């Protein structure tokens, strides 16, 4: 499998647009010391795109772009607290995204975003698969604890992109509030079973997690409070 030069250029442009959108520095990881020609082409293309199209915008936003060897980058990812965009070749991205997601919580917290090279078109979706097993359990009348966070964030990321294109600040504020609601709820111990297992392991008790509807109800109530406190909506 290989990529054409134009595809690598588009990959570089999409990565840099996304880094600017998220307000984070960008790293590219390759193994150009071993795969000198192919990986070296990725490294050279990213550097060229950065210098010719993005350096001024990155520096104006106090951001940077840097290339790192994949082994060095993996070690950095494990010890870091995040706060950067990591551009990977396809196989590296498939492996490392799942590793980071599971290592820091759950695949149920991971979203997937596709961005056009011009930065104007975006598709956002949950990175995990469907929840057929949970749905069948729900149909049988069983209690389920399905994590909706990735689906919520896929929706908010799409809305946020629309808000930026339209300069719709109230909509952008709503997406920030909803994402903050999700993060704060989990940090304060309100979570679904998949996340509670990561914390409690074999000592997991029923009191440690919320079922699907209880969790969504908690998010809804908390979001309304936050929207009111931030004056994004008014009490009626």
Image (spheres, rainbow, N blue to C red):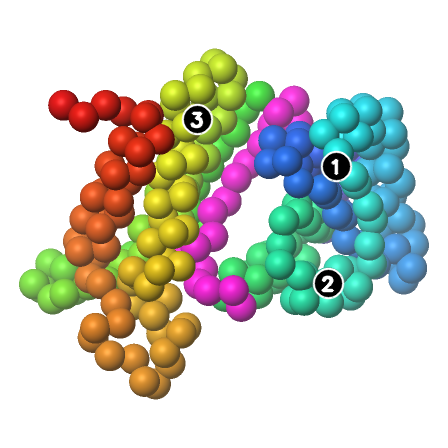
**Residue 58 image position (x, y, % from top left):** 76, 31
**Residue 210 image position (x, y, % from top left):** 22, 63
Residue 129 in sight: no
Cα–Cα gap, marks 3 and 2: 32 Å
Above or below, 110 relative to 226: below
Disc 3 on helix, strand or loop?
A: helix
Disc 1 on helix, strand or loop?
A: loop
Residue at the spot of label 2: 76
Sequence-first disc among 2 and 1: 1
- Front-most of residues 208 and 88: 208
- What residue do we see at 57% from left, 21% from top? 120
Residue at the spot of label 3: 172
Q: Which residues are magenta?
A: 103-119
- What residue do we see at 14% from left, 65% from top? 143
As drawn, the residue found furthest toward the front would be: 229
Sequence-first disc among 3 and 2: 2
Cα–Cα gap, marks 2 and 1: 18 Å
> Do the residues bearing badges 2 and 1 touch, measured as CB atoms within 8 Å?
no
- Split into 4 quadrants, where in the image is the C terminus? top left
Disc 2 on helix, strand or loop?
A: helix
* 68 magenta-colored: no
Mark 2 closeness class: few <14, some 14–19, many ≥20 residues within 10 Å: few
- What residue do we see at 70% from left, 47% from top? 87
- Front-most of residues 88 and 77: 77
Residue 31 in sight: yes
Mark 1 closeness class: few <14, some 14–19, many ≥20 residues within 10 Å: some
The answer to whether residue 180 is left or right of residue 226 is right
Residue at the spot of label 1: 63
């Amino acid at each position: 499998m290989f990529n054409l030069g134009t595809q690598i250029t588009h990959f570089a442009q999409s990565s840099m647009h996304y880094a600017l959108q998220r307000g984070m520095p960008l790293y590219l990881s390759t193994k150009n010391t071993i795969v000198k020609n192919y990986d070296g082409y990725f490294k050279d293309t990213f550097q060229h795109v950065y210098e010719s199209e993005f350096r001024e915008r990155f520096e104006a936003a106090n951001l940077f772009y840097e290339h790192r060897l994949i082994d060095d980058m993996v070690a950095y990812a494990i010890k870091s607290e995040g706060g950067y965009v990591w551009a990977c070749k396809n196989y590296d991205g498939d492996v490392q995204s799942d590793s980071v997601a599971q290592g820091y919580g759950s695949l149920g917290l991971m979203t997937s975003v596709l961005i056009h090279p011009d930065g104007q078109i975006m598709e956002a979706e949950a990175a995990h698969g469907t929840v057929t097993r949970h749905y069948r359990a729900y149909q049988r009348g069983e209690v389920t604890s399905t994590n909706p966070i990735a689906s919520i964030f896929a929706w908010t990321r799409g809305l946020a992109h629309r808000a930026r294109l339209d300069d719709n600040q109230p909509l952008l504020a709503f997406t920030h509030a909803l994402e903050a609601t999700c993060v704060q709820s989990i940090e304060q111990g309100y979570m679904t079973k998949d996340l509670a297992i990561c914390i409690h392991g074999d000592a997991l008790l029923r009191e440690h997690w919320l079922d699907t509807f209880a969790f969504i109800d908690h998010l809804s109530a908390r979001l309304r409070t936050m929207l009111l406190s931030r004056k994004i909506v008014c009490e009626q």
